[in-house]
Image (spheres, rainbow, N blue to C red):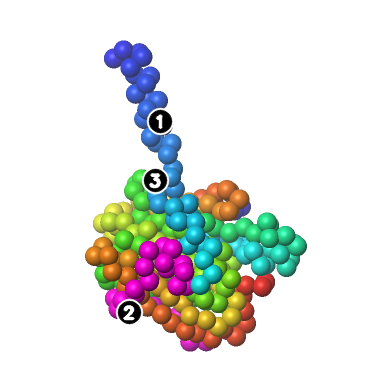
Amino acid sequence: MERRKFLSMTLGALALAAVPASVRAEDFRKLKPTVWTAKTVDDAIKAMYGSNALVMEGVKLNAPDVASNGGAIPVDFSTDKDVKTIAVFQDANPEAAVLVVDTNKYSVNKYSIKIKMAKSGTITIVAQGNDGKLYAAKKTLDVALGGCEG
Amino acid sequence: MAGIKVKAKLKNGVVNVKSMVKHAMMTYNMAEKKTGSRDNANFITHLSATVNGETVLDMSTSQFLSKNPIFKFKFKGIGKKGDKVEMLAVDLKGKTYKGKGKIK
């Protein structure tokens, strides 16, 4: 092999290998910055998906009825639908968005996370199906001790 | 050391991953109250996991996750016992956190 060719190939391979996963992945904070500054759940859902016509089925959401510690509320959510993204919103904090998962072909869409809520409120999970529908689930819970003021 | 703890277990063809990122997750309100400036807020903005170079989790997050947030997730179709689940988190200040765990 010619030396020049070999060098350029090696460089090319190196450049490919150097791209970290986070660059290939969808970063919704950069893609849709307005989602993260939206004050209400409705606005955030609209900013994220362009519509807020929710279908209240297909998503399971599990959270305690009363959270003693608002600093770490366990939230489990799952869906059996074929979905592109799943987003978590709540209405107790200054901004609505908590996280957005970009699913992939390996995903089993069942997640458990812990979130903070400053006061009692409603958690909304929205899953965007590949059929374009927005599947959602809501859960209202009481927070005994708010978690956002530290 | 700042990092991510990763535990992964293979069961019936599905890999269950439990992970914890060591991070204060300072919200804007907390930062203002504690340090007097909203600019001191810092939280994880993006979290991803890879197995054998393939992305299995990709999450964009905000400040409303708990302190030292725990993430549990599952994936299938990739990864066997002994493979490593590698996780990478990036926070608002651009600092990266890494962690990996073997699938058991």
Measuring from the top left, give residue B20's x and y in whole percent. Answer: 51, 62
Q: Is residue B22 above or below residue B52?
A: below
Asked whether the beta carbons under mark 2 and mark 3 sit within 8 Å of each other, the answer is no
| Mark toward the viewer: 2 or 3 | 2
Residue hosting label 3? A24
Q: Looking at numbered disc 2 in the image, what kind of residue is underneath it? A: Met
Mark 2 neighbour density, 10 Å: few (under 14) some (14–19) many (20 or more): some
Q: Which residue is mark 1?
A: A14
Q: Position of residue A102 (x, y in %)?
A: 37, 58
* Host chain of mark 1: A
Secondary structure at badge 3 equals helix
Distance from Cα at disc 1 to Cα at disc 3: 16 Å
Q: Who comes first in sequence, dot 1 or dot 3?
A: 1
Amino acid type of the residue tagged 1 in the rendering:
Leu
Q: Quadrant of the N terminus of chain A?
A: top left
Residue A95 visible in the shown view = yes
In the rendered image, which quarter is residue A51 located in?
bottom left
| Amino acid type of the residue tagged 3 in the rendering | Arg
Q: Which mark is residue A56?
A: 2
Mark 2 secondary-structure assignment: loop
Give the extent of the magenta segment.
Answer: A41-69
How far across and down, in percent of the image, does residue B49 sit?
Answer: 41, 54
